[in-house]
Amino acid sequence: MGNMYNKNYINNFSVFNNGDIMTDSYVTKRFNKDIKKLDLPLIRFHDLRHSCASWLLYNGVDLKTVQEILEHAEYSTTANIYAHVAKEKKKQALEKLEF
């Protein structure tokens, strides 16, 4: 695109080939269309953040790192809202208390 490339959003992840930013509504509509096309269960695009946080924690990534990946200002946001601890992890933690 040369000089016509929009450099206003150069550090953004979601841009079109010409550099224009993808709006939240565009990403949501496209995501829903693709989910339907692939015959997958309908979830909100934002739910992927919950899944990401949970899987990172389940696989041993510490909560502070997850907070930074999700770019939450508050540690408590990640811990209280996004980090859904799997039942298996709870069981493993309780087993460590056995003598």
Image (cartoon, grey):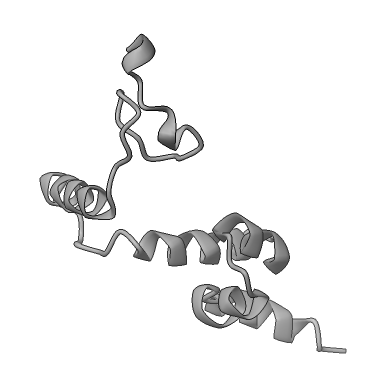
Give the x, y percent position of residue 96: 80, 81
Left or right of 49: which side holds 97? right
Give the x, y percent position of residue 39: 14, 51
| Image quadrant in which you'd find residue 21 | top left
Quadrant where the N terminus lies?
A: top left
Viewer-side residue, 12 vs 80: 12
11 above or below 91? above
Quadrant where the C terminus lies?
A: bottom right
Residue at 51% across, 73% down: 82
Viewer-side residue, 56 vs 11: 11
Residue at 36% across, 27% down: 6
| Image quadrant in which you'd find residue 97 | bottom right
Left or right of 69: which side holds 33? left
In the rendered image, the residue lying farthest to the right is 99
Residue at 51% across, 37% down: 11
Left or right of 45: which side holds 84? right
Q: How many marks?
A: 0
Residue at 49% across, 59% down: 52
Give the x, y percent position of residue 47: 36, 65
86 above or below 59? below
Give the x, y percent position of residue 53: 54, 64
18 above or below 60? above
15 above or below 95? above
